[in-house]
Amino acid sequence: MAMRCSRCGAQIGNSYVRFNGVLLCEDCARELKIDEVFRRQNSIFDQAFPMLDEFPGVFSAGSDLDFANAKIRCPRCGTTLRDIESGGQLGCIECYNTFNESIMKNILKRQGSSEYMGRKPGEAADVKGEAKQGTPVQETAQVKPEIKEESKAPEANNDDILTKMKDADLSTFTDQEIEDAMKKAAAAEDYSLAVKLRDELKSRKEGN
Amino acid sequence: MWYEKEGNNMDVVLSTKIVLNRNIKGFPFPPKMSDADRENVLGMARQAAGTMGLNFVRTDELEDNAKEDLYNQFYAGYAFLNSNAKTGYLMSKTEGLGVIINNTDHISIVSMVPGTDVVTAYKRADDLAVQFEKSMDIAYTDKFGFLTSQIKSVGTGMQLMMTLALPGIEKTEGAVQVLAKRVEKYDWQMIPMTHSDGIRENGIYVLTNVATLGITEQEIIDKTRKVQEDIIKLENSCRKNICTKKKGVVEDQYYRAYATLSYCRRIETAEALTLINWLRLGQNYIDTSDADLDWNKINKLTQKVRRNYTDSAVKGVRPKDRASARAAFIRDIMKGGQAS
């Protein structure tokens, strides 16, 4: 499998830098000013008769690069890029500006999208759903989870379910819901959706 | 105690907890704050508490018994309650609801409910969050949402945790891996409950949300309910399967566990939890008519054994005395006492 730069996602060729476990392409390393290893390599190759004992020093220079992360600092609180990469801990609000967008995006990859979609300050989120409390736990085995009721409700209209399935993130549906929708899609001759749902079910089973 | 109330599906989901993190503009995040900044934030929290009907306490002024109550009811961790880093706590009249001040973030609203009722837990926390946001200048940008000290919660600032008792899944070969992969699809993470000293709580798992940025609060809640449904279904089917195929073994272990917990004089946490797992596994699926046991007792036992202030105290109580005290409250609960 081809290696990719952790910062820009580009496929990496022969020139790359690995520091603190993060793989960077040559361009990103230069942008972050940790490209000394490339500069020293070039200078050595430019020489007609380089000293042989310089080679090991040049190609093992990667270990020095660990310290580069400690040099990029937040001007307000002194938090370094290394602090963030090692623990995910920011020091102040200014850190969000200091550590440039692409690095933040890279870190935020763990969370999925980097686009905020939640509510605004002071506005309560309109969260829907039954807020039942106090169902006797002894009856648990007989009680149907609330979610079941919800998934049954739209059955009256097949088109609604199929439209919803087309646009929605399938990971939010249970196996049963997808299987039901797949049958309905096939019955409604919406074969592209049926295939999509079949593939999702298949990948889940393989994943399991 | 909030966890002794009745909740939905408490045979599998012990509790659902929501933490909403908020920070105040103009101050560094707590790990980088000076003492003066910490005092300022405590002052602002005290002022806000007055208008919001909450009781403000400084943790360095808390009595030991108050710390014990807050710890034993999962409101705050041992290290937080015993640090002298100018931290505070806002107590609500609503059980299971409170606000931690100056821990990882300036304001961490904690809302806990027994069982699966994630909507109630969220609404309670969100009501408080909105009040803070209206009365303070909260750190927020349109791009990142609510700015938090931990990158993992930036965005909605919302961390959702479910504590699960999964003896059926744990005793079924490969089922833990199946479930872990399954919850990953919902952008969740499942980890075995482990104490800071590395001791694992057998059969107890924590499920947390991962995505907080490219997702709305409603979507997090919806995914939570889907995850809950899947887990409850899988755990119940594993329990039923084990109790059908190994009926004799489960019955024997169930009554041995019942007898040991009813009459023990010294018992370690790990052993107690292993025994409680057998009770949980068999309770709905074998003949339990010879045991005076219900889900309320089993859940109370589980939570009290898991969370005991004296167990976490570094000094003061000898291990064998802790084991004796633990055995005493377990016997009391088995007899139907309050063990408070």
Image (cartoon, coloured by chain):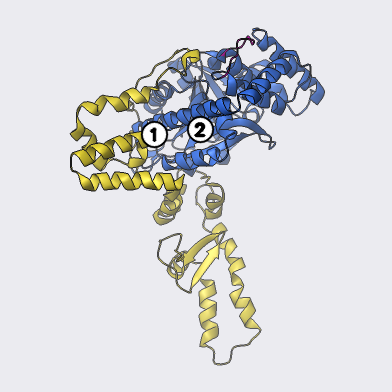
Chain colours: A yellow, B blue
Task: Quadrant for residue B233, please give it.
Answer: top left
- Quarter of the image containing the N terminus of chain B? top right
Task: Quadrant for residue A47, please give it.
Answer: bottom right
Q: Give the residues drawn in magenta, as a range.
A: B286-294
Which residue, given by chain and number where applicable, does mark 2 sit on? B106
Q: Identify the residue at image location x=56%, y=30%.
A: B168
Q: Is residue B38 left or right of residue B65?
A: left
Work out whether residue B151 or residue B337 is closer to the camera in this orientation and state it: B337
- Quarter of the image containing the C terminus of chain B? top right
Task: Say what amino acid the circle numbered 2 marks.
Answer: His
Residue A160 percent coordinates (x, y): 20, 33
Work out whether residue A139 or residue B99 is closer to the camera in this orientation and state it: A139
Residue B8 percent coordinates (x, y): 46, 18
Q: Is residue B312 visible?
A: no
Mark-to-mark CA distance, 1 and 2: 28 Å
Instruction: Tell me whether circle 1 and circle 2 mark residues in contact (CB < 8 Å).
Output: no
Q: Identify the residue at image location x=33%, y=39%.
A: A117
Q: Secondary structure at mark 2?
A: loop
Work out whether residue B152 or residue B253 is closer to the camera in this orientation and state it: B253
Query: Does the stretch in magenta take in A46?
Result: no
